[in-house]
Image (tube, rainbow, N blue to C red):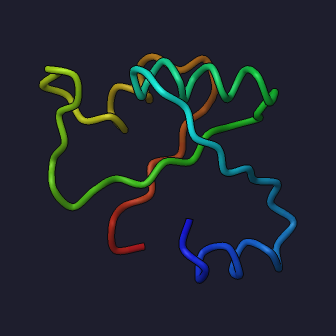
Amino acid sequence: MSPGLRSRLAGTDVRWRFEVRRGDPITELARAATDHDASWVAIGRSARRRFPCGSRTPVSERLVHECDRPVLVVPPDA
């Protein structure tokens, strides 16, 4: 996590956590949301399209469809 992002989050009421997991990004993001009883998940959308694990769908789009929590997709310019 960049120091700039860490300092911006430090002055807010937003509860956040940085952790590293291995495996399918969608499975691990959804599992982390459940493990931490998250109310919702925020994920940044890349300016370039990414297709992990042979998928033809970007991570953010797959997470919106497969996660059992609300997902906020943040555009790259935000």
Q: Relative to 70, is 48 on the left or the right?
A: left
- The answer to whether 58 is drawn above or below residue 18 in the figure is above
Q: Quadrant of residue 24?
A: top left
Residue at 45% x, 16% y is 66
Q: Relative to 9, is 22 on the left or the right?
A: left
Residue at 45% x, 48% y is 73
Q: Relative to 15, is 76 on the left or the right?
A: left
Q: Point out residue 22 in the picture as x, y percentages from the top left corner.
A: 48, 27
- The answer to whether 45 is drawn above or below residue 64 in the figure is below
Q: Point out residue 75 in the picture as x, y percentages from the top left corner.
A: 36, 61
Residue at 49% x, 48% y is 43
Which quarter shows the C terminus?
Answer: bottom left
Q: Quadrant of residue 35?
A: top right
Q: Quadrant of residue 7?
A: bottom right
Q: Point out residue 34 in the picture as x, y percentages from the top left corner.
A: 72, 20
Q: Relative to 32, is 55 on the left or the right?
A: left
Q: Point out residue 58 in the picture as x, y percentages from the top left corner.
A: 24, 35
The furthest residue to the right = 13
Q: How many marks?
A: 0
Which quarter shows the N terminus?
Answer: bottom right
Residue at 33% x, 66% y is 76
